[in-house]
Amino acid sequence: MAGGERRVFGARMSRLPDSAEYVERFCDRHGIVRDVALRVMLIVEELFTNAVVHGYRGESDAPIVVHLSIQDGHVAILFEDAAPRFDPLSVPPVNLEAPLESRAVGGLGVHLIRQYASSARYAREDGRNRLWLRVPCASLAHATKAAQR
């Protein structure tokens, strides 16, 4: 992902607030409206937590990389970890209409990510899980087009 900003965090839950601050500051610098910034923060929080708890199976100094950029009216996220291979996009969609007691545990975070991202792509490259997501920001797209006129 060219351009943008990249941060590396140790896979520790104590670093989760640092990742949220990173996202918040990025969004503030780029004039991202609060509701979109909160969506991006929620996505990063969900991916970060899952990487620590399920991917690395506990806290460690292993890397979690979050790269943010602005692309065509979207906040683009590249989330990377070096945990064992896992494609969150392969998780079956949650049936929210099914009775609670018949639903499998988990999957709601991936459901939210699917709701908030307009596109998502996963690859295992160079021993890393890489997930690319784009979160639309209509007000940013409008401001970009207005500035180009």
Image: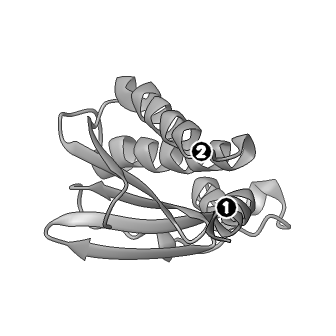
* Above or below: residue 17 compared with residue 121: above
What is the C-alpha distance between the residues marked 2 and 1?
Answer: 9 Å
Numbered circle sitting on residue 116 = 1
Task: Give the residue at x 73% y 64%.
Answer: 142
Residue drawn at x 50%, y 66% is 133
Looking at the figure, which quarter contains the C terminus?
bottom right
Residue plotted at (46% across, 26% down): 17
Which x, y percent locates residue 101? Answer: 77, 55
Q: How is the image coloured?
A: one colour
Q: Is residue 83 left or right of residue 101?
A: left
Classify the position of the N terminus by image quarter.
Answer: bottom left
Q: Position of residue 100 (x, y in %)?
A: 79, 55
Circle 2/circle 1 CB separation < 8 Å: yes
- Tell me residue 72's x, y (percent): 56, 72
Quadrant housing residue 103: bottom right
* Nearer to me, 72 or 10: 72
Tell me the SS state at disc 1. helix
Using the rendered image of the protein, determine whether residue 7 is visible from the camera's viewpoint.
yes
Considering the numbered disc 2 on the image, is that residue within a helix, a strand or a loop?
helix
Disc 2 designates what residue?
Answer: 42
Given the image, on which type of amino acid does mark 2 rest? Leu
| Three-letter code, disc 1 | Tyr
> Residue 9 appears at what percent x and percent y?
28, 37
Left or right of 89? Residue 112 is: right
